[in-house]
Amino acid sequence: MGAYFLCCALFGVTLALLGMDEVLENINDTVLGFTVMTLYYMLTEGITGRSLGKLITKTKVMDENDDKPSFMVMLGRTLCRFIPFDALSFLANGYGWHDSISKTKVVKI
């Protein structure tokens, strides 16, 4: 999540440097968070299968056949992260709903 907050900060600084401070003042925080989080995960996990956290833990996202997930699967996985209490779903079985619904898994590499 630290990388997500860094992305939000960089997005804000970029808009401010471009003279678009008004956009930041008028944008809904929920919409901004949804957009930045979706872009972050799609640009990291969607392209490489690895977010900053996965780079640190030496893990990678794979589909149920141990192949690289398609763009649409990764988009679905990312959107499932917005399900309320997704983070708590790890307590039940050790993996999140965003993995079970999208039929993906995180594996050590």
Image: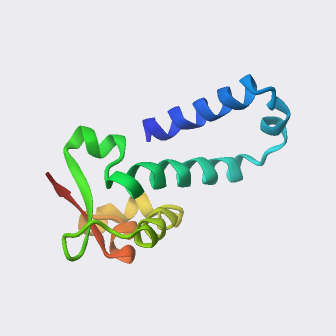
Residue that appears at 44% across and 42% down: 1
Residue drawn at (48%, 66%) of the image: 75
Q: Is residue 16 above or below residue 108?
A: above
24 displayed left or right of 101: right
How is the model colour-coded? Answer: rainbow
Query: Residue drawn 59% across and 47% down?
Result: 36
Q: Quadrant of residue 17?
A: top right
Can you give x and y, in whole percent of width and height, for residue 93 in the image?
Answer: 25, 69
Quarter of the figure with residue 38: bottom right
**Figure check: 93 above or below 50:** below
Left or right position of 75 against 106? right
From the top left corner, tell me how far across and down residue 74 is, in percent: 42, 65
Determine the image quadrant of residue 23: top right
Image coordinates for residue 11, horizontal then vertical, percent: 63, 35
- Between 95 and 102, the one lying in front of the other is 102
Q: Residue furthest top?
A: 17
> How many marks are shown on the rendered structure?
0
Q: Is residue 101 left or right of residue 10?
A: left
On screen, residue 14 versus residue 64, left or right, reads right
Residue in the foreground of this view, choosing between 85 and 9: 9
- Identity of the residue drawn at 66% across and 29% down: 14
